[in-house]
Image: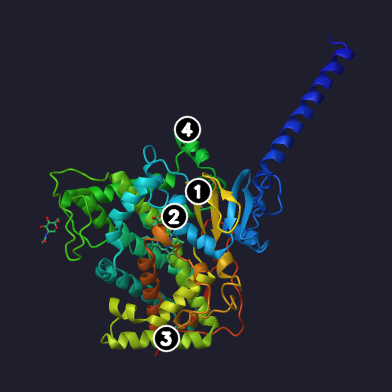
Amino acid sequence: MRTESEQNIDNMIGIYLLIGAVTLLYVYLKWTFSYWDRKGFPSTGVSVPFGALESVAKGKRSFGMAIYDMYLSTKEPVVGLYFTVRPGLLIRDAQIAHDIVTKDFASFHDRGVYVDEENDPMSAGLFQMEGASWKALRSKLSPSFTSGKLKVMFETSDAIGDKLVDNIKSQLPQGGNIEVDIKKLMATYAIDIIGSTIFGLNVDSFADPNNEFVAISKKINRKTFTDILRISALFLYPGLEKFFVRIGWKQESLELMRDLAHRTVDLREKNNIVRKDLLQLLLQLRNQGRINTDDTNWSAESTKNGVKSITKDVIAGQLFLFYAAGFETTASTAAFTLYELSQNAEVMEKAKEDVRRAIENQGGKLTYDAISEMKYLEACILETTRKYPALPFLNRVCTQDYPVPDSKLVIKKGTPVIISLLGMHLDPENFPDPFSYKPERYLDENKDFNQAAYMPFGEGPRMCIGARMGKVNVKIAIAKILSNFDVEIRKEKAELEFDINGASLMPKYGVPIRLTLRK
Ligand code: HEM
Ligand SMILES: *[C@@H]1O[C@H](CO)[C@@H](O)[C@H](O)[C@H]1NC(C)=O
């Protein structure tokens, strides 16, 4: 039996330990969250322990929106903030942001997100890769995204556009109209575009909505707690994600994607199948050491005695990344554009006329050249990607100490920096009347906006490699819709709400538009 006094001593020790632990934690947090004060950087109001991500942790805002909130909360050109306990910098000043991704690229050449080329090939996409290996792959892949290559792939996208139109027609009641969720339709369109022109699959998700590619995509895009945890780790705590992978915590959807990529490569190599898609170009790189700049030669037969310059896993990693980078962005940009057209009668008329005339000039056919001729529609897409940048932020990690222009501040190597595209694109100091949808901004001779602030596809050596491809596919879908249907003009304008999940800017409740068959 222990005496009462002995028990009292135990309790006392417990209380002291607790006080000690709380004090230590307090000191640690105080120290952590004073990082920017100690470095002399202005910072936003600090909330412990989530910092700038409090609203994200509470499920109220998406990551991109939380960064936008930070952008709005101050006027400082460079602001310190905390991604939970990790300090990072928000670059608000358009010119500094532009410099960081372009002329000062040497100090910011990586994104600093999780990548492990050796042990986890699915992580080693062009977006995540770093330094010399990024540079080498980027220059090898560049010939895949030229307009010559896109022109050849155009037929495939065009056929998918026709399936989109047929699908809507089949839903339309005779002589009547129908309200569709254009976001959902565009997601089906985009998945078929990626499946066919990138993965080289025969997918028709309008006819077969449960095909393997769609099934895997659904797994990737479901938003369970663990998915959200893994995505956050990927961007904010690369070391943690590395640990998850090391202990063998696999992400099933990525494994399925990898397996699908391997099977497709094997099938093509064994049977010497030649198709005109991105996979074919990756196979060229694999078997010939480079991508052919001759747009008529799509052969991927080995010219190097069977020597493979990239592995199947490297191919799988790029295919997965192109899917991740191209799917949601293409679908949302197309849907947002149609939504804005349905709210702006004048813009709609001009866009319709632009499409009509370009097709007429090409002998009544929607060709690649017709698409290139649609300058007003192009301006619409530029305006959509301003108001709704599908990826609402750019991010880099500082790779070499960087003195902030016109100040005494120095950004230390290793610091993550983030640029809020949404913030810069909706700032009246950069764009007059920023919430109005005005494609004319880009047609205007004197371009009445701050051009440094406009970076919907990023800028500099790491800008979006698929920008041209994305725009072409968005234009095809819209041109098809506008030339087959009349879109009802909404009587009252309304701003869309955004989803809180995921890194990209997505509509929360879909995008309703009402269509009638055109006579
Ligand atoms: C409307 C469609 C699209 C938008 C708005 C978009 C936007 C972006 C943005 C903002 C970035 C970051 C750029 C930077 O950090 O400077 C990016 C990077 C990238 N995008 Fe896109 N994208 C689109 C379509 C596509 C498509 C269709 C593909 C692939 C086929 C693609 C592949 C990539 C790749 C590979 C990167 C990383 C490039 C690198 O780090 O070298 N994107 N995209
Ligand atoms: C296509 O390119 C490959 C590799 O450069 C070459 O070996 C082959 O002869 C070319 N084929 C034609 C028909 O030009």
Which residue is under mark 4?
247
Assign a secondary structure to mark 3. helix
Tell which circle, 1 or 4, labels the residue nearer the N-terminal end.
4
Tell which circle, 4 or 2, labels the residue nearer the N-terminal end.
2
User: Between marks 4 and 3, how big is the CA–CA gap?
Assistant: 55 Å
Residue 94 visible within the image: yes
Which residue is under mark 3?
352
Assign a secondary structure to mark 1. loop
- Mark 4 is surrounded, within 10 Å at the Cα level, by few (under 14), some (14 to 19) or many (20 or more) other residues, namely few
Taking the view exactly as shown, the residue that stands out farthest to the right is 4
Q: Nearer the viewer, residue 364 or 36?
A: 36
Please, is residue 141 above or below residue 163 in the view? Answer: above
Quadrant of the snapshot with the N terminus: top right
Which residue is under mark 1?
398
Tell which circle, 4 or 3, labels the residue nearer the N-terminal end.
4
- Mark 2 is surrounded, within 10 Å at the Cα level, by few (under 14), some (14 to 19) or many (20 or more) other residues, namely some
Identified by mark 3, the residue type is Lys
Disc 3 to disc 1: CB gap under 8 Å:
no
- Res 377 quadrant in image: bottom left
Identified by mark 4, the residue type is Ile
User: Between marks 1 and 4, how big is the CA–CA gap?
Assistant: 29 Å
